[in-house]
Image (cartoon, grey):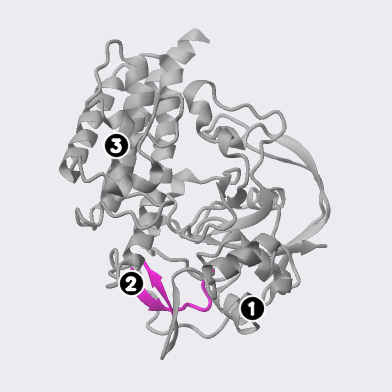
Amino acid sequence: MASHRAEVAPARAHWLRERYADVRAATSGLAAPLSPEDQLVQSMPDASPTKWHLAHTTWFFETFVLSRFVPGYRVVNEQYAYLFNSYYEAVGPRQPRPRRGAMTRPSLDEVRAYRDAIDERMDAFLDAPPGGGEALDRIELGLHHEQQHQELILTDIHHALWSNPLRPAYRAASRPGPTIAPAGVSALEWTSHPGGLVEIGHAGSGFSFDNERPRHRLFLEPFQMARRAVTTGEYLRFMEDGGYRRPDLWLSDGWAAVQEHGWTAPLYWQHGPEGWSEFTLAGTKPLRLDAPVSHVSYYEAEAFARWAGARLPTEAEWEVLAAAGPIDGHFVESGTLAPEPPGVLPEDRPAQMFGDVWEWTASAYLPYPRFRPLEGELGEYNGKFMSGQMVLRGGSCFTPRSHIRATYRNFFPPGTRWQMSGLRLARWA
């Protein structure tokens, strides 16, 4: 057994070196279309500048890998611990999140040099990583952490460019959509599940975050789930039926949010002489009525479900059906930069459960039975946010394909709209 472990560790270190290079290059590629000014802007307190994402993900490897496992390690710049810490109280104080856009220094060139310096040190570290499996585990966690920030780079710059009165495009989509918005919407069909005792949660040797564990049993009542996500055209009918003017459709907190913020449509929608359009990363485009609706909050998703005579699925219902099918869909690698229609629906399972849009569930973000956070400072990664948040599942067209799995639990406050979030309907059988 000992000799087997000795063989596995070098192979894993080699694989992580290649994956590290790929993930870091992908992050730089996402930032490439942006000017230095683009990468500094912070358009709202919940978003962060691209430059900060580039630096923070680098600080993560320096702080939680190099500083922990390299004897006598000297950090590149002691000030970076304050500037680029996100929420790790155990590590020390940090720049308040709403003021990350005030950091004009260090410059973008200095941040890029910081990334290069840490990449060189990480490459040397992976030649013969001290710390064994624990160090490799932290590197793999750091890579998935960086992929989370890749998605945040896109969601945050989307909001920043929308906030610019010029409404500039991030870049053209690799596969342009139709020049006119399709008028047809396929009829909604349902997949049935008998319910009963099921298991959810991650198990096995592959990577998972601590909030996906442990795998556990629970009982489901018989239910049905829509075979595709709710479309823009269907959501438009909700709006035309007075959806944003009918308090009977809304949770109390949701109706308060509608009143406070003046919501009348999903974020990034606008109405003009030629009808409705939507601001995307490829610029302002006509609504695609057959594509999944996006940028709606949990409150809006729940109100739509009530209007449709249905409900949102629980995360357990969602996972049971998602785990039975392949992980396919439109991810960030497709280059579409926007949700797309599902195409021909399979007969035996729901479609679009991965990619396109994150799907709100009816489940509060809470610990699984016997949940244990990671030990030490990384225990702050997920566990301390298990209050006041709702779970989303499935990933989106901004999510890296290698980052997602059926057990993945994303979470945001119920009023969040700047994420690529949509919904799928469920109902009792």
- What residue sits 76% from the left and 62% below the top? 224
Amino acid on which disc 2 is placed: Gly
Task: From the image, tell me which residue sits under label 2.
Answer: 283
Position of residue 239 relative to residue 294, above or below, is: below
Query: Circle 1 — which element?
Result: helix
The crowding category of the residue bearing disc 3, from other C-alpha atoms within 10 Å (few below 14, some 14 to 19, many at least 20), is some
Magenta part of the chain: 277-292
Q: Position of residue 341 (x, y in %)?
A: 51, 71
- What residue sits 36% from the left and 75% below the top? 284
Per the rendering, the mark at residue 245 is 1
- For marks 1 and 2, give the CA distance: 29 Å
Task: From the image, tell me which residue sits under label 3.
Answer: 21
Indicate left or right for 23 with 424 as reference: left
Which of the marked residues, 1 or 3, is nearer the chain's N terminus? 3
Indicate left or right for 369 with 233 as reference: right
Which of the marked residues, 3 or 2, is nearer the chain's N terminus? 3
- For marks 1 and 3, give the CA distance: 50 Å
The number of discs equals: 3
Amino acid on which disc 1 is placed: Arg
Indicate left or right for 144 with 81 as reference: right
Q: Position of residue 145 (x, y in %)?
A: 43, 38
- What residue sits 32% from the left and 29% below the top? 81
Which of the marked residues, 1 or 2, is nearer the chain's N terminus? 1
Quick check: is 289 in the magenta stretch? yes
The crowding category of the residue bearing disc 2, from other C-alpha atoms within 10 Å (few below 14, some 14 to 19, many at least 20), is some
Query: Circle 3 — which element?
Result: helix
Position of residue 227 relative to residue 57, above or below, is: below
Q: Position of residue 320 (x, y in %)?
A: 70, 49
Q: Is residue 18 visible?
A: no
Position of residue 46 relative to residue 70, above or below, is: below
Q: Quadrant of the C terminus?
A: bottom right
